[in-house]
Image: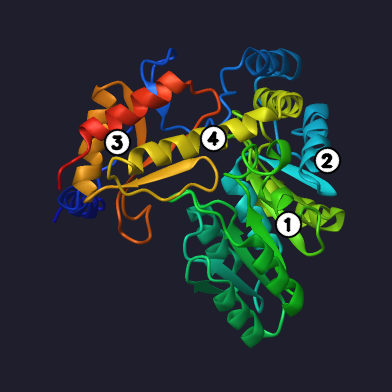
Amino acid sequence: MSFAPFDWIDDEARRRADAGLVRTLRPRPAEPELLDLASNDYLGLTRHPEVTAAAAEAAHRWGAGATGSRLVTGSTALHADLERELAEFCGFEAALVLSSGYAANLAALTALTGRGSLIVSDAGNHASIVDGCRLSRADTAVVPHADPEAVAKKLRAHGGRALAVTDSVFSVDGDAAPLPELAGICRTEGAALLVDDAHGLGVLGEGGRGALAAAGLAGGDGIVTTLTLSKSLGSQGGAVLGPAPVIDHLVNAARTFIFDTGLAPAATGAALASLRLLRREPARAGRARTVATALYEQLTAQGLTAVCPDAAVVSVQAPSPDAAVRWAADCRAAGIAVGCFRPPSVPDGVSRLRLTARADLTEAQIATAVATVLRTAPLT
């Protein structure tokens, strides 16, 4: 009898194909051929000459790689400068840079909870939060989306060490979490609040300082935030920001920090250059929000169903997974790159196109994007 240990993969592939959920890699060329409304480059900085020059200079000076974990040889002066300036910009006491936003969420959730503690997690949270909850070994209660009272009930029933976690801006629909209400509940119940500000940094708050700054909560007691350097800052990596004792604890307890190679110097230098550029040009944040509003208003005025954006994500409903795939492909054929979200990426099972509002889009490009999405929209 022959042994075929991966035959089950063929069955999984057939099930994905039948459900219209096959995903494929599509390498992009170095020079953009499409108008980009699919990436997370909210401020249009990933190709900015200052940012790319900083990445190149950092690689020349510090080397192509970090060479080791941050606790061995992977920390450079660039990492320290970025951490200091991120914390200052966002209004927190300290920051810790990791190799990705995913790693940052795993670090915070696993190091700040554990057996016997409780995590209360919004049903719409990103997959990195879901995985962090699973790895934490804490009891996890998933509550309905954007429902502060459900969070309060879970925290009151637990009575011990607890943490509530939420995206600041949800990546599927682009709606914002009720942060003031959540912070008040956590304060009353003695729980920590962890906010993933991946889609808020650079877009929300004065000059793009983030969702917590916009809500007047930055640096508050019991509040920790994670963010990514790969969206508004146009680079790669992630960070955790919070009180200095919390950051010191992560250095000593967070496995995705301790045992992972440090962020490469080029990415660190690029993120630092983007942050400094944003400080110098704060209007970029407001422009990203203006573009999002324009996309939403023009698409819905023509009968499409979309979620009113709270930041820079514009989510447009599609009738089915297959229709969403065809719609995105037709947009691409017409010269526009858009995101396509289908189950299991969307917890409510509703497939969508996701459009990124970038600060550097012109009025003519906005009009072209709207016309293309409308022209290619599926009838059913």
Residue at image mark 4: 290
Identify whether 206 is placed above or below 43: below
Residue at image mark 2: 88
Q: Earlier in the sequence, mark 1 or mark 2?
A: 2
Residue ID at (66%, 79%) = 116
Q: How crowded is mark 3: few (under 14 residues within 10 Å), some or many (20 or more)?
A: few
Residue 232 visible? The answer is yes
Disc ID at residue 224 = 1
Residue 26 visible? The answer is no
Q: How far apart are marks 4 and 1 (CA)?
A: 28 Å
Identify the element where label 3 is drawn.
loop
Q: Do the residues labelled 4 and 3 touch (CB within 8 Å)?
A: no
Q: Which of marks 1 and 3 is nearer the N terminus?
A: 3
Residue ID at (18%, 41%) = 378
What amino acid does circle 2 point to? Glu
Q: Residue 15, percent across and down?
A: 19, 54
Q: Earlier in the sequence, mark 4 or mark 3?
A: 3
